[in-house]
Amino acid sequence: MKGMMEFKVGARTAALGLRFWDPVAAAFVGDGLRVAAYPVADPSRRVEATANPSRAWVFHKLPGLAVEHGEGDAAFWGAPPKTRSYVIEVDDAQARFVPFQLTVDAPARGPLAWTPPAGVTLPAMPPGAVPLFSTATRAVPQGMGVIRADLWDAAAAAPAAWAVLTAAVDGLLGVRGLADAEGKVALIFPYPAPIGGGADGLTGVRLTEQEWPVALAVGYVKAAGKAPARASLPGVLTQAAATLWETWDDLNAAARVKLAPTTLTIAYGAELAVKTAGGKPAVLYVT
């Protein structure tokens, strides 16, 4: 393959290419995804991308564009065809990642340069990559921690679909999880550096006895009507701050207690499942 950054194969020039980043594996994903595109106003004209050896998902043809027979050189991209907007839908046949969609303009030279919204931190993600978020059913790799919750919209008496749960683990910021349509979320992350102990402050605490403080925050705005089938980037990442509850009482609002970040810790080798006491069993209330 030549002209990789222009996605050109022989005399064919691709209209669009995207790279998807898995923060758990710290790698681009080049298998198992179904990446489809269609014009914003016409979902019936759907086409699918294929992954190339560089783990970029490439569309050689997009409805309404005729760029695949261009040369893909500097002269071609100096006066490219008029752009059109497309919805990109991303699903995972292996159930590792939460389904989502985003809207982009094509054609685009090289991999799409996606950028997160201002103020949103996605640690260690390569510039231009599109983030993937783990499902609650994904297997947790050995040596990594996980925080789980079933987020429940107390006002709507329904799952908090597509809410974003963020954790600071021992001060490590940007650990982020995206709830699915049922409000289920898992934050999978590498453990922080071991905390010292003993007389010198560095030794004496076994790894299996290590614990770290966890501070949680949630962004959530209930969608009007029925929850959409997929999360929508970048909007889900900028949802307004919501409140998590340590205890809940349906009849007595004064008895409800907000979840205080200082009350949470995660221990090495043990999952942290966060739940609200009272109300609906085994869920974490959000308002």
Image (cartoon, rainbow, N blue to C red):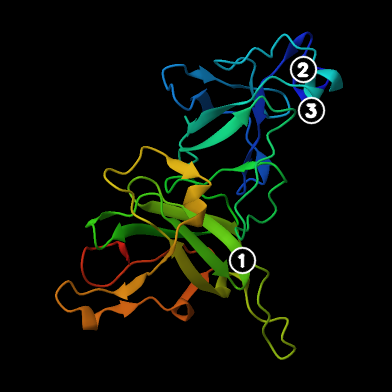
Q: Position of residue 230 (x, y in %)?
A: 41, 39
Q: Amino acid at mark 3?
A: Met
N-terminal of the two: label 2 or label 1?
2
Q: Amino acid at mark 1?
A: Leu
Query: In the figure, 47 relative to 165: above or below?
Result: above
N-terminal of the two: label 3 or label 1?
3
Q: Is residue 206 left or right of residue 238?
A: right
Of tags 3 and 1, the one toward the viewer is 3
Which of the 4 quarters of the picture holds residue 48?
top right
Q: Is residue 79 left or right of residue 44?
A: right
Q: Position of residue 202 (x, y in %)?
A: 73, 81
CA gap, disc 2 and disc 1: 39 Å
Disc sitting over residue 42 in the figure:
none
- Residue that appears at 32% across and 44% down: 227
Of tags 2 and 1, the one toward the viewer is 2
Binning the other alpha carbons within 10 Å of mark 2 as few (below 14), some (14 to 19) or many (20 upward) gives many
Report the residue marked by disc 2.
8
Report the residue marked by disc 1.
173
Report the residue marked by disc 3.
5
Q: Amino acid at mark 2?
A: Lys
